[in-house]
Image (cartoon, grey):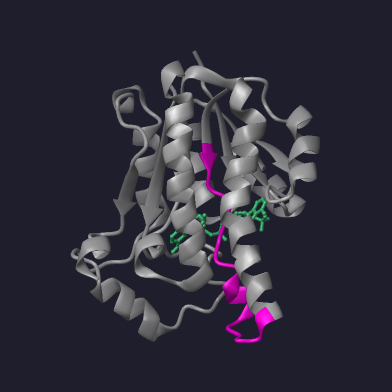
Amino acid sequence: MTREVLVTGGGTGIGYAIAAAFAANGDKVTITGRRESVLTEAAALLGARAVAFDAADHEAVEAALAELPGRVDVLVNNAGGNTDFLRGDSTELATLAAAWTANFRANVFTAALVTAGLRGRIADGGRIVTLGSIAAHTGAGSYGWAKAAVEAWNADLARIVGPRGITANVVAPGLVVDTEFFHGKLTDERRERLIANTMNKREGRPEDIAEAVTFLASAAAGHITGQVLHVNGGAFISS
Ligand SMILES: NC(=O)c1ccc[n+]([C@@H]2O[C@H](COP(=O)([O-])OP(=O)(O)OC[C@H]3O[C@@H](n4cnc5c(N)ncnc54)[C@H](OP(=O)(O)O)[C@@H]3O)[C@@H](O)[C@H]2O)c1
């Protein structure tokens, strides 16, 4: 049976590579994101459906549900990012509170709202994979805090959906290039430092993450749930 796969944030970067991997496998893929033009272009290349909405906004998610597939075999909560790249650092309290809220919304609300909205449509034996980050363990301020919360949320989710044979796991990348994540703010010095932290001395690529996600979504991974899979060249334990 052809699987129905939904990838949030599937128009760019890691999400696009994940969507491409499922599409190449013959699965029916729906991608989401906020920018309609980015999604339309990506969907045409992928042979996927595109549904534009803000996954951090509960009313927008609610409104989008009618456009989303009636059955979901694989849900990939990939939408997210570090909103501090767009805001900068500040000790001004109102600015700080807004920055922490923004990262929580961008990374936790997006996963929690879409999953809750679709939970009744996820097929028995289905798969939920959510993008975390090495930052949940190494810092990065409100972004790391939000990705740590994703891990805690996922543990509960795995318990809730487990009796239906549905697995819920987190894939936690380290540095991944060729995405919009850094908004052009990745300096050569930082890039070299992050590569030096890996054991295999290279940056991650979107396809590295897609391989891990498609494995966790496969029948072979049916007894793996509630876990965090680190895909970062060993940087998690070497940094
Ligand atoms: N690249 C890295 O080094 C790295 C490392 C660790 C973890 N990650 C995680 O990997 C995931 C993918 O990131 P990426 O590197 O591929 O960056 P990216 O190219 O910026 O992809 C993020 C995608 O999410 C979408 N998105 C963001 N907020 C959204 C919202 N509120 N509602 C709907 N869609 C939203 C974006 O599209 P729109 O802007 O059009 O909405 C975009 O397509 C993220 O969760 C990120 O935190 C990345």
Picture residue at 62% right of the left edge, 21% below the top:
121
Residue furthest front in the image: 93
Residue 70 figure quarter? top right
Q: Does the magenta portion include 51?
A: no
Is residue 1 something that shows in the picture? yes
Image coordinates of residue 78 in percent, x first then y, are 53, 48
What residue occupies the far top of the structure in this picture?
Answer: 1
Residue 96: give x, y in percent of width and height.
63, 77
Q: Image point 68% across, 79% down: which residue?
A: 95
**Up-down relation of residue 38 to residue 24 (above or below):** below
Q: Magenta span: helix, strand or loop, mainly?
A: loop
User: Residue 10 location in percent, x, y?
Assistant: 58, 46
Total numbered labels = 0
Q: Is residue 9 visible?
A: no
Q: Is residue 218 left or right of residue 94?
A: left
Q: Nearer the viewer, residue 138 or 205?
A: 138
Instruction: State which image quarter holds ligand 1.
Output: bottom right
Residue 91 included in the magenta stretch of the image: yes
- Please, is residue 210 above or below residue 138 in the view? above
Residue appearing at x 44%, y 53% in the figure:
132
Range shown magenta? 76-93
